[in-house]
Amino acid sequence: MSLILCIAALSLLVVGCSGPTFQGWSGFAASDGVLCFGGIDGKVYAISPTARSQTLTFPAQDEWVFSIPSLGTPGAICGPACAPASPGTSIYATPVVLGDLIYVGVYAGDNGKMIAINRLAPGYTEGVPLRSKGEWTYPSGVKSIGAIVGSPVVVDETLYAGSSDGKLYALDALYGEKKWEFDTGGKIWTSPVIEGGVIYVSNFDRKLFAVSGADGTLIWQTELSSSIASSPAVSGDNVFLGTFDNHLYAIDKANGKVKWNFEGGNWFWSTPVVKDSTVYAGCLDNKIYAIDAGTGRELWQFVAAGPIVSTPVLANNLIVVASQAGDIYVIDSGTGNLVQSIHIGSPVMAPLLVEENMLYVHAGNLCVYGIDFQNGEKVWEFCYSSIE
Amino acid sequence: MVDIWNTIILEPVLNSLIALTNVLGGSFGLAIIVLTVVVRLALFPLTVRQTQSTKAMQTLQPKIQELQKKYGKNQQKLQQEMMKLYKEAGINPLGCLWPMLIQLPIWIALYQSIMQALAATPESLLSLSQHLYSWAAVSHAIPLGDKFLWLNLSRPDPNLILAILVGGTMWVQQKMVTPPATDPRQRSMTNMTTTMMPLMFGLFTLSFPSGLALYWVVSNVIGIVIQYFVSGGWGYLRTPSAPKPVPIPTQKVIPAPKAPEVQPSKTLQKATEESKAIKKASEEKKRGLFGR
């Protein structure tokens, strides 16, 4: 009896201390030939595809690495008796660039922060932003807001970001001061989308909100039957988003009324993309669906080897999709036929980026790949796990 | 193997827990309590059998010790005599083990379900999506609210309240079933089990999601209640100190080529009678509990 209890206790210790972890899956912000992204190790990297293709030693010119200042919540899940199972901070949000600044949303368990870094050369000293370089953090000092998962958006020098504390923040992008906040009442793990001065934002409390971009006043809100983890996509008169009840919804952006819904085999987590009256939605049932934006009718479906978490990307008449099983698929967007498949061998959950013929992939093995997606050739790879 | 485990054991428990949360107005804490009670009630016959087997085994301890003294150097003979003793008393020595072995996977599944359902990080929520049924009650409940009383169920309890409750209830439960040992070595081992385990679990509570600690407290309390009614009281919790060692016959036993018929001493006879009485009483109680 005592032996069984001892084994149970030790098992609990092992399982508990290596329990829920967070890693992050940031995509890329491209500017002036440099890619910026948040690493799984909680650092921000700026890499030059040119330098990487020449296999120059990191950091080459224009390249840098920056450690996110600690928010003082080691491990977040683990308590005082355990060593932290995750780095103190992580980055899920894809950074955005405006002028000389790059904006990064930080996830640290219960806490989060929005930080602005000088993208030419970070000036932070011991975690304190260098004001002369335009850098700031929100909130400033040791204060924090809820953890940030969804990517921020910058429009007209205003930065909009949703937080796990349920609030949508509008910040002055140059000085980091709060312009207004809008409390949605439920965790926001999605990115807001802005169209015609209106912000559309979804939350875990099953609601989609349309909020005035100018002052944060509510225009309308609509409640769906399940929680929403997919960021909305706006096209024409509709807002498209997926929910935890396995449905993709088309909602009238003028009044929030549901026009149609489409049922998949699992949650729609990734953000849908829309082109030429077709909605392309990746689903956790391993499929990508092409759906008629006007009627909700399925046009085609493609079955991948694993769940689709990453937001797909369109390039001319092709759609590029990554699966959690570690494969990239280049698919004809009109027919759903496979054109090319590339094996990465590690889960891909970060949004993809396409520039001309190059596809940039941030994989779960702490590596970034530059791939010519027309011929499927891996042009370069950059693994940052060994960088000090 | 992992897939079989997930399909047969983990997913039914996990989905029931989430659906129950929806039924109980979105309170995950209440769902943990209700599911723990339901599972313990479903396993009640096994728990009763285990408790009775353990108690019957304990009554034979003086006799077993006597046999160990007698046949300590002849393991084969000792095993034979012990089996004979169990047979005479009508006890299966593995009787207290297999109910525990059957219950263990269900406890592990319940533990895993609580950890998975809490899904505090984006990765764990994605992982959860692969184990859910397409029931409306499940999709409506996700993601689960993690507030219950003063607790955030996905985080450790910052107060000591839950740690004290876990440690305290575990100590009471252990104390109720652990007989005071006569042998000093065994006594220190017993003391370590009854004191160290509650202390360790109390410490774990400071590090684990409080949803899991809530499950430990409820499970321990139900265990105490079952123990109280099945054994008819507080068991060894009320025993002030260790009993005096059982008198061992002083005459020297000379090993013979053929083992002599063991003449049961008064202690042995008493122990056998006691174990038989317990078995008889348990049969009657079982009939009373589950009908004839």
Image: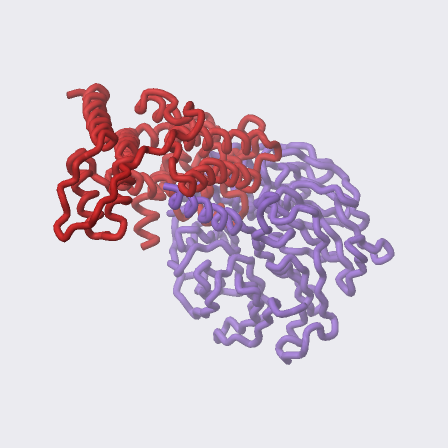
Chain colours: A purple, B red
B283 or A13: nearer the viewer: B283
Residue at 37% in and 28% down: B37
Q: How many marks?
A: 0
Q: Is residue A334 visible?
A: yes
Residue A252 visible in the picture: no
Foreground residue among B169 and A295: B169
Q: In which quarter of the image is residue B98?
A: top left
Quadrant the N terminus of chain A occupies: top left
Seen from the viewer's position, the closer of residues A215 and B61 is B61
Q: From this view, report whether residue A144 is shown above or below residue A343.
A: above
Q: Where is residue A23 in the image (x, y as percent from the top left)?
A: 57, 55
Q: Quadrant of residue B85?
A: top left
- Give how far across and how far down residue A319 sits, in percent: 48, 62
Looking at the image, residue B96 sits to the left or right of residue A187; the answer is left
Drawn side of residue B282 relative to residue A4, left or right: left
Rendering coords of residue B229 (x, y %): 33, 21
Q: Nearer the viewer, residue A75 or B159?
A: B159
> Does A178 appear above or below B73?
above
Check the image and report above or below for A231 versus B285. below
Residue A190, image x and y in percent? 58, 45
Q: Which residue lies furthest to the front in this view?
A: B251
The residue shown at (42%, 40%) is B184
Q: Which residue lies furthest to the right in this view?
A: A132
Specify the quadrant that holds the C terminus of chain A.
bottom right
